[in-house]
Image (cartoon, helix red, strand yellow):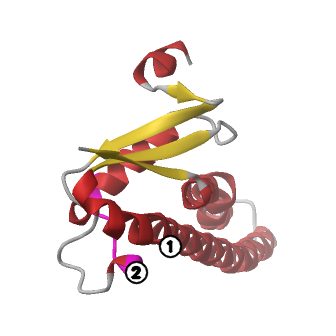
Amino acid sequence: MKNIETRYKRENGSFLIEIKLKEVRQLFNTFDPAPFREKDIDDDAEAYIVESVREFSLDTALKLVIYLPESSKDEAIHILPEAIHNYFNYRFNTFNKELRFVLKRGRISLLIGVMFLFFCISTGEIIDRFGNGMLMQIINEGFLISGWVAMWRPIQIFLYDWWPIRYMGKLYEKISKMPIEMKFIS
């Protein structure tokens, strides 16, 4: 935390994520034909904001401060806060959909894995009835290993795959609600 305190200014209990622009258009993706309120944020600007916010815990108070020339004041006041909040709220919703999709895929994978594991164990039990030879033991062990390998994907989803998506969703939610201040430079 000490290193963060030297890199970011602090004002009224909030750390400041600061961006200096020459014009409002710099913040937006120039290839997106949508009006500014619905436009995509420029990839570099998004990456800077997201990576800056990631340096802090999710419960740290942050504020986005955008420096612009005085000539951009009228345009910026009406467009920027709403456009930034809309964009990051859209990204938050996208990550929530992705999380629901991953968890649904996990439930389906778990169902398939359990059914296949049951099939493999049952088949192994039937093979055991035919004898105790080395070949039968190898086949039985092969079925058992195959059944547990089928459980690999659901276990991976429920132990590892979902939480980075959930974290990013929370991060985008935080940014979508973060206060935005504009400072105009003459």
Circle number at residue 86: 1
Task: Name the one closer to the observer, 68 or 170.
Answer: 68
- The span picked out in magenta is 37-44
Task: Name the one closer to the observer, 104 or 87.
Answer: 87
Pointers 2 and 1 in contact (C-beta within 8 Å)? yes
How many other residues sit within 10 Å of disc 1, few (<14), some (14-19) or many (≥20)?
Answer: some
Q: Does 173 appear above or below 29? A: above
Q: Does 36 appear above or below 70? A: below
SS for callout 1 = helix
Q: Amino acid at mark 1?
A: Asn
Magenta highlight on residue 161: no
Judged left or right of residue 135, residue 37 is left
Residue 174 coordinates in the image, percent (x, y): 61, 54
Q: Does 11 appear above or below 181? A: above
Q: Image quadrant for the C terminus?
A: top left
Judged left or right of residue 8, residue 159 is right
Residue 178 coordinates in the image, percent (x, y): 58, 53
**Disc 2 designates what residue?**
38
Magenta highlight on residue 41: yes
Determine if residue 165 is in view. Answer: yes
Say which label, 2 or 1, has the lower sequence index. 2
Q: Does 48 appear above or below 169? A: above
Q: Quadrant of residue 149?
A: bottom right
Q: Residue at x 32, y 69 (%)?
A: 75
SS for callout 2 = helix
